[in-house]
Amino acid sequence: MRFTGFTDSDFETFQIEGLEERMEAIEDRIRPKFRTIGQELTDELSARLGSEMFLHIAKHARRTVNPPQDTWLAIAANKRGYKKHPHFQVGLFDDFVFVWLAFIYELPNKQEMAQTLLEHIGVLKQEIPKGFVISTDHMKKEAMPMGEIDLEETLKRFRDVKKAEFLVGKHILKGDPLLKDGDRFIEMVKKTFETLVPIYKLAYK
């Protein structure tokens, strides 16, 4: 299957009422696209990092009542799971696609990684373009442009607050023509990940 882009129907998935009905639409509309682009991106990251990376597609298995507000693929260095490891993500809400390097609250060594990033904050400021966005909670849509955020305070909060997270990357709004062009979209994601790889490596120092 060739990825030809995201459609209005993909975004409308998140307007469907009911857990079962929405999950069925995610399975039919979005997951086949994730499998296609995910494998290409996993191969790209494995080559770039010089070690095997593994594709995970969100299952939303813990949900019993409320349908998911977003869905995603994740690429991590661990075959069994991704939440306890820094990982790369591509996913969508009902009005934008997100492309992240994600450090979420389930990281067992979150404080140490946060401290390492703080100690190399100059590198982060140099490596992360001003147009990228930062989020502190993967469950919420809100994100701040890199050029407007207090990076030091954000990283300190990530280190000191148990549920705080650190996600850096891009949002592409639903109407952007880029999303309709599969090849251009994949190329953009690869370039975004290329920019974020030094930060991923830094966290493991």
Image (cartoon, rainbow, N blue to C red):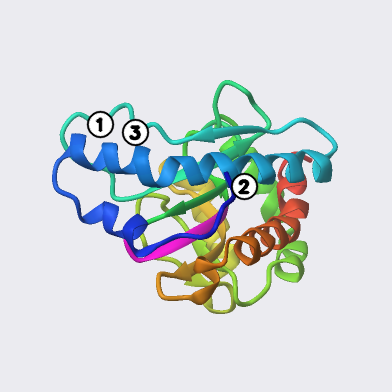
- The kind of residue tagged 1 is Arg
Looking at the rendering, which quadrant does residue 65 occupy? top left
Magenta stretch in the rendered image: 94-100
- Most extreme residue toward the top is 80
- The kind of residue tagged 3 is His
Q: Which mark is residue 63?
A: 1
Residue matched to label 3: 60
The overriding secondary structure of the stretch rendered in magenta is: strand
Comparing 92 with 87, the one in front is 92
Comparing 192 with 11, the one in front is 11
Asked whether the residues under the numbered discs 3 and 1 touch, taking CB atoms below 8 Å apart as contact, a structural biologist would say yes
Comparing 120 with 176, the one in front is 176
Residue matched to label 2: 114
Magenta highlight on residue 98: yes
- The kind of residue tagged 2 is Ala
Q: Position of residue 52 (x, y in %)?
A: 76, 30
The residue carrying pointer 2 sits among few (fewer than 14), some (14 to 19) or many (20 or more) residues within 10 Å by Cα, namely many
Q: Position of residue 167 (x, y in %)?
A: 54, 54
**Dividing the image into 4 quarters, which one contains the C terminus?**
top right
Q: Residue at x 50, y 67 (%)?
A: 180
